[in-house]
Amino acid sequence: MPEFYRIYFDADELDALRGACDLQSTEEDMRLDEAAVGDLEDAVTQESRADDMLLMKSTVSIFKPGQAIIITKEDLGLMQKSLERFKDEAPPELLEPIESAIEKIENPGRAV
């Protein structure tokens, strides 16, 4: 059974997270288009990754600032990966919220 964690994000962190998930989802979709002309197994794997990021993007879009979010470590990992990737392309005003969100993801509270 997966372990669940409780985490909170403020408005700026959520803006950063939304931008990060949007960018990552777009990149996974582009990789899916490229994989479609190759090996079937690679295409299926990439489709799964693209679907996971689309779901994460959709999920993050409904989060509210200060809302308690109950989430798995795997999903937190997807968020962190997206934020790390987004650092290189984010506007300067989101760099601090990105770092703050990553810190929260690395140290989430355990859900009871």
Image (cartoon, rainbow, N blue to C red):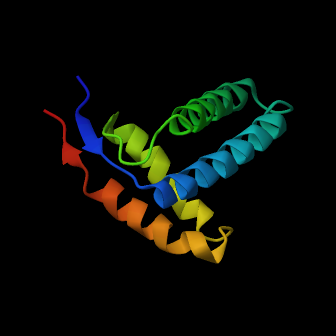
Quadrant for residue 25, please give it.
top right
> Residue at coordinates 60% horizontally, 54% vertically from top-left?
20
Specify the farthest residue to the bottom: 92
Name the residue located 25 percent from the left edge and 40 percent from the top edge.
5
| Screen quadrant of the N terminus | top left
Name the spot of residue 9 as percent of width and height, x first: 39, 52
Give the number of marks: 0
Relative to 7, is 47 above or below? above
Please state if 63 lies on the left or on the right of 40 as rendered. left
Q: Is residue 75 left or right of residue 85?
A: left
From the viewer's perspective, tell me whether residue 61 is left or right of residue 97.
right
Q: In this orientation, which residue lies closer to the viewer: 88 or 14?
A: 14
* Above or below: residue 10 compared with residue 31: below
Q: Position of residue 50 (x, y in %)?
A: 65, 34
Left or right, residue 15 beside residue 39: left
- Residue found 83% across the figure and 35% down from its top: 33
The furthest residue to the left:
112
Tell which of 46 and 71 is nearer to you.
Answer: 71
Q: Identify the image quadrant of the C terminus.
A: top left
Q: Nearer the viewer, residue 11 or 87?
A: 11
Identity of the residue drawn at 52% across and 34% down: 62
Would you place residue 8 above or below residue 52 in this image? below
Report x, y in % for residue 19. 63, 53
Residue 6, position as x, y percentages in the image: 26, 41
**Image vertical order of residue 33 relative to residue 77, above or below:** above
